Structures are given as C-alpha cells and as structure tokens.
C-alpha cells in the first residue's frame, strides 16, 4: 500500500506497478510502498488448517522474533467492537471495509464439524450436517458474539454431534430409521448408552421439531447429582497457603490452584483469562470473569504479574496474552491437561472448587452466584440447598409475603 496526504493512494500503487526500468526506481523513491500482512499460511508447515486467532498470534510472534518493521507492516486487528466501529469511519482515508474472522473456539467447532461430516456416509451426513450447522453452530455463534463461547463449550458441542452420530449408527444396527422410532427404542438406547443419553437430547429435539421422528418421544435426563468431593477446612487453608508460599511449585500451578481455592473458578474459565481481563487501579489488581471484576489479594496479584511477565511460553508479540499459555502459539492451556498437572502437584481442582463454592452460597442468593460464576441458576439453587441456605424462605420473610419463581 502507498500512503499519501493522509490517505491510501491506490492510484500511486498502480502507477508504480506500471513503470519499468529507471522509471520504476524513481517511482519507488517518490511513493514508498508498505507490504501489509494480515495472515500466515506457512510456518515450517502448512498452517491453513489452524484457526485464524492462532495464525494471527503466530504471525505477531514472527514479526516480534525477527524484528520486522516498515516497510513490512502488520494489518491492525481487534476483538473490540468499539474499535472496529471506529475503523469504519476511516473511509475518507481510503479504507473500504473490514474483514471479519471467526473466533478461536468457534473456528475449532466449524472446522471439526466440516471434517467429521465429510467422513460420514451420505445417509448420515444428510442429517448430521443440517443439525450441526443450523442448530449447534448457530447457537455457538450466538454465544460467541456475547463472549461466552469457551473451549469447554466447544468440546460440549462436539460431544453433542458425536452422540447424534452414535445414535444414528445404533439405529442402523437395530434396522430402524428416525421415522419408525418408538419410545421403547429410546429407552433401550438410554439404558445401553448411559454416558450418551443426555448428549442425545439436542438431536432428538431437533429431529422432532422438524418432524423427522414421531412426536412425544423423550429421553429423560439423569437425575442431577450433588457433589460428593470436598476438603476439610484446614486442608483447604493449607493448600491455599502452599499456593502463595511454596516457590518449588511451578508458577502456573500456584496461580491456577489459588484462583480455584479463592474464587471457585472452573479451570475452563481460568485458561481463558488474558492480560486484557486484568486491570490495575490505585494499587489493586482486578481480574474480570463473566463481566464481573473482583479484587485480588496482594500475594496472588504478584504471582499473576510474574506469570504474565516471565512465563517461558509467552512470545514477545504485541496484543493480548493468555495467563496460562499453551504449547501452540495463540492457544491457552488445555483445561484437562491443567487438571492433571494440578493433581500431579497435590493440588486437585474438583474437591477444592466444591469447597470454595460453599462459603459464598451461605451469604449470597443463588441467582447472584450463578451470574458471578457463569453457572446455570438451577445448578446454583442445588448448591444453595447443599450449603443449607434456603433463599426463597429468607426473601419471603424479608418481604413479608411468599416468594415464587415469578416474584
């Protein structure tokens, strides 16, 4: 691109391309051109199969590691809608529009669906493709636009598609089709595939809504089980102190385990944290989770600062950085791998998070907890029952009248 008089001058670029010999040299001196790079397609291997967010991070790392500068230029990129709207006002400078790319987790889902459907026999692909694209991916786009589509959500959606494929394969072994499905067949499926029964519900509902199978067929969800793994209060306190003070532990382990024990954050949300989620004001550090900021104790704030500054897997590239970066450029730690690492160091996450969930539920209504932690209100209600807090009764006594779901 050629920049002239505060705007992009495409006509100058065309003039440069049209000249030959000495005229080309004169034109290059008169109108310097910048090579603007917006994507990466090869880096020791073909990376076109990577999600754009990952390719962008690798591209930024390449610019930083090689010290590339003008006349090589990185194309601006943002995930902030306000910044994007501001760029649309640059039409006077020659900008004609913006290019939108899928976010990482959404791109992982769409790419996985395309690969998976391509390997199915035609009779199954004709059902799975519309279910995945019109139902699963459509809902994922809606959640992604709100910033709520996590890696765990992507894995859950993949599980729903796999359950639908498994269900169709099972129908084939029973010499059945969707149109001839009966309730007794569904009951048999649910008994034989207990781990897939809940995952099958979205596909069954989608098929029923499109009259692909008889109405009034249901798969009952398994009864919700309350958690059974907890820590003694003293054990919980000792592990938290270990996170703060044991310098023999890896820094990322101390950070993740402390966030679990202090704020009951699931690992799926911890791995999504970037430096953009953390702000500092008047000596305090405030991470933001599910759009809610909360203050960190000074020791944990220092650990997080050190993690962001000294993590060996962080590149020097500009832009946001994951608090817990993964081995691949632009990707966070896998939450399952992180859980294994925490267990290896004697700081398991599940029992610690269950224990940390109990204290706020004694003092706060379930709806508030659901919003703060990003869990379903019914889940928060079950936890409140386990914690011994009956907030319907408490609110009723405070207002002097019965309180129901519509109050």
Image (cartoon, grey):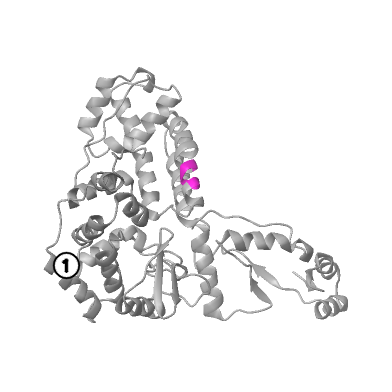
- Would residue 115 be counted in the magenta stretch? no
- Residue 40: % across, % down: 56, 64
The residue positioned farthest toward the front in the image shown: 400
Q: Can you say which quadrant of the picture contains the N terminus?
A: bottom right
Is the residue 207 above or below the residue 381 in the image? above
What kind of secondary structure does the magenta stretch mostly adopt? Answer: helix
Look at the picture and state if 385 lies above or below 186: below
Whether residue 132 appears in this view of the structure is: yes
Disc 1, SS: helix
Name the residue nearer the viewer: 298 or 302.
298
Please tell me in which quadrant of the rendered image residue 165 appears.
top left
Instruction: Indicate whether residue 139 is drawn in magenta.
Output: yes
Q: Where is residue 236 in the image (x, y as percent from the top left)?
A: 16, 67
Judge from the rendering whether residue 25 lies leftward or rightward of residue 328; answer left or right. Answer: right
Q: Can residue 47 be seen in this view?
A: no
What residue would you read off at disc 1? Answer: 236
Q: Where is residue 9 in the image (x, y as percent from the top left)?
A: 81, 68
Q: Residue at x 29, y 58 (%)?
A: 336
Report the residue at 15% width, 55% height from top. 229
Residue range (magenta): 138-142
Residue extending farthest right: 23
> Badge 1 local density, few (<14 within 10 Å), some, or many (20+)?
many
Name the quadrant containing residue 98: bottom right
Instruction: State the residue in front, 300 or 169.
Output: 300
């Amino acid at each position: 691109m050629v920049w002239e008089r505060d705007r992009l001058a495409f006509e100058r670029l065309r003039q440069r391309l049209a000249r030959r010999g000495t005229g080309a040299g004169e034109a290059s001196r008169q109108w310097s051109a910048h090579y603007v790079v917006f994507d990466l397609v090869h880096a020791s291997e073909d990376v076109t199969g990577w999600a754009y967010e990952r390719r962008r991070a690798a591209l930024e790392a390449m610019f930083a590691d090689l010290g590339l500068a003008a006349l090589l230029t990185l194309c601006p990129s943002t995930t902030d809608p306000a910044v994007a709207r501001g760029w649309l006002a640059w039409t006077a400078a020659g900008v004609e529009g913006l290019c939108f790319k899928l976010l990482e987790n959404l791109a992982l889902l769409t790419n996985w669906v395309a690969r998976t459907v391509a390997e199915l026999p035609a009779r199954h692909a004709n059902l799975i493709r519309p279910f995945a694209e019109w139902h699963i991916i459509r809902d994922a786009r809606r959640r992604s636009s709100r910033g709520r589509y996590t890696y765990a959500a992507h894995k859950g959606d993949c599980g729903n598609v796999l359950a639908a494929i498994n269900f169709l394969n099972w129908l084939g072994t029973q010499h059945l089709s969707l149109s001839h499905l009966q309730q007794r067949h569904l009951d048999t499926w649910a008994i034989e595939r207990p781990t897939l029964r809940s995952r099958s519900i979205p596909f069954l509902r989608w098929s029923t809504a499109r009259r692909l199978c008889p109405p009034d067929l249901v798969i009952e969800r398994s009864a919700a089980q309350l958690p059974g793994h907890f820590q003694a209060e003293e054990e919980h306190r000792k592990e938290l102190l270990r996170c703060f003070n044991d310098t023999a532990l890896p820094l990322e382990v101390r950070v993740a385990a402390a966030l679990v024990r202090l704020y009951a954050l699931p690992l799926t949300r911890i791995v999504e944290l970037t430096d953009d989620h953390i702000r500092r004001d008047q000596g305090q550090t405030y991470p933001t989770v599910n759009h809610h900021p909360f203050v960190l104790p000074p020791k944990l704030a220092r650990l997080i600062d050190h993690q962001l500054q000294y993590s060996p897997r962080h590149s020097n590239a500009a832009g946001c950085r994951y608090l817990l970066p993964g081995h691949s450029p632009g990707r966070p730690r896998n939450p399952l791998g992180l859980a294994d690492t925490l267990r290896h160091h004697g700081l398991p996450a599940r029992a610690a998070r269950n224990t940390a969930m109990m204290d706020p539920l004694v003092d706060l209504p379930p709806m508030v907890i659901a919003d703060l932690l990003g869990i379903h209100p019914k889940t928060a209600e079950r936890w409140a029952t386990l914690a011994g807090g009956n907030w319907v009764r408490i609110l009723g006594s405070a207002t002097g009248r019965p309180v129901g779901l519509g109050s």
